[in-house]
Structure formats: structure tokens, C-alpha cells
Image (tube, helix red, strand yellow):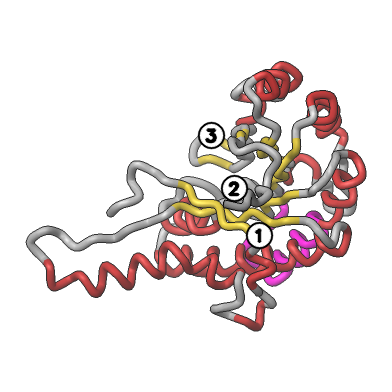
Amino acid sequence: MIAREGIFPTFFLSGFECSTFIWKDQGRRNLCDETGHAEHVQEDYALLRSLGIAVAREGIPWPLVDRGASYDFTCLEPFIDAMNRNQILPIWDLCHYGYPDDVDPLAPDFAERFRSYAQAAAEHVVPRVRGPHFFTPINEITFFGFMGGEWGWTAPFGKSKQQREQLRLALCAADIAAVKAIRSVAPDARMVHIDPLILVVPPKDRPDLADEAEQETKEDTFYAWDVISGRRHPELGGSPEVLDIVGVNWYSFGQM
């Protein structure tokens, strides 16, 4: 057997909660602060190295760094210092359910606003950390669509299937634009596109709904990946190279 070099330097990866969403009834939240990671970043990364882990997902808080006409990435400096000191390779998560107060994800200029931010973020972090460089432009587009478009948990607080589908497609378009912007800065940058696996099954007493359940599975599980890869809405510029690395989340409620 011929050993093949892995995508990442260590088999086990890690990550830190980094959501900056506006949560229902609670306003803007910053889970990096709430979990204590921001305060203990040096200890956190030293612990990873002691466990033989050299990769970590780390968030860039879009709502906190985007000033509208400019960007302020100074909040990243302690994290970059800790990464370099402990030789941790980051997967930069650019949008973990949160966006700036003056941004509307359903507005026509959303993709361009996110593209500009993604390019600025890449220009800041790429020269400051060792490569190879990994990015997750928008985390869990499918789940974000449900949370913000149909369930009303987070902004933009949609409450319908139509709003979910509109938000999902808008996030896909912005993601594709961001990938191309990042690669204009770092042509060899790798993208990690993450979504949950979903399996919709018919009730035990309704086997006649099997076809409908299978179709819903395809729509809710693979739609975002299909758009990003260019299989759907090719006018948005998706391709397999844009999709790149697929990350799968497995949740206890993944079968419905």
C-alpha cells in the first residue's frame, strides 16, 4: 500500500465556537467571548499541541471587523500570535451565522459586500500565518437558511420556507464570490464547505411517502453544495474547484 499525504498536517482537527449572530430575544452574541476562548487563546492552542492536534477552525467576527468603509482586524492579533507560537494551522471561518448590523443578506448588494470583506480578511491573515491556507467562507449554509429563514432563531428572522430558500441561495451566491476573492489573494487557498447530513424518512405507517422523503432529503442536504459546485444555478459561477473540501456535520436530529 502506498501512503498518501493527507490534506491536513494532523488526522484530528479542532475548532472553537465562533458565532456572532443576533439571537432572538438576546441581541448580538459573541460566543468566542462567552466560552472564554478569547481570554484563554494561548492556553487553548498550547493544549491542542500537547494533544498532537495542529489544525483549528478559528472565526473572524465579520460584524466586529467590518466598519462599512473600512476593516479593523486588530482583534485577531492575539489569535494569530497564539497560532504562530504553537504552530497551529487555522481554518478561517468568515461568517458563522453573523453579519454586520447594516447588512441585509437578501439585498442585491449582499454578495459584493461579503466578497469585499472576504478579500480584505484574506489580505490580512494570509501573510501573517503559515500555509497552506484554509477558509470556510460561510458556515453551514443549509442550517443557516433554516435558523434565519424559517425558524426565526437568528437574523434575518424569517418564518417561511420561501424565506429560507431565498436566504440559502443568497448565501450560496455570496460564498462563491468570496471564494474567488480569497483566491485572488492566495491562489492555492483551500475551501472547506460544511453542512449537516440530513435524512428525511417517511413515517412507519406511510411508506407511500418514501419518494417525497427522498426528494426532501436531496433538497435539504445537498442544495447548497450543488449550487457552490455549479450543478445548480451555474450563472452564479460555482464549480467543483469552488466547492473543494466537503465537511459533514452529524447531528442527533439529522434524521427527520
Inspect the image, locate mark 1, and give the three-letter code of the amino acid beneath it.
Asp
Q: Is 219 displayed left or right of 115 in the figure? A: left
Q: Does the magenta stretch include residue 256?
A: no
The image quadrant where one finds the C terminus is bottom left
Inspect the image, locate mark 2, and give the three-letter code of the amino acid beneath it.
Tyr
207 versus 149 height, above or below: below
Please identify the quarter of the rendering in which residue 141 is found.
bottom right
Q: Where is residue 199 in the image (x, y as percent from the top left)?
A: 32, 58
Residue at 57% x, 52% y: name it: 1
Task: Give the crowd class for mark 1: few <14, some 14-19, many >=20 residues within 10 Å.
Answer: some
Whether residue 99 can be seen here: no
Separation of marks 3 and 1 at Cα, in angstroms: 19 Å
Whichever of callouts 3 and 1 sits on the residue coming sooner in the sequence is 3
Residue assigned mark 3: 26
Residue assigned mark 2: 97
Residue assigned mark 1: 104
Please identify the quarter of the rendering in which residue 105 is found.
bottom right
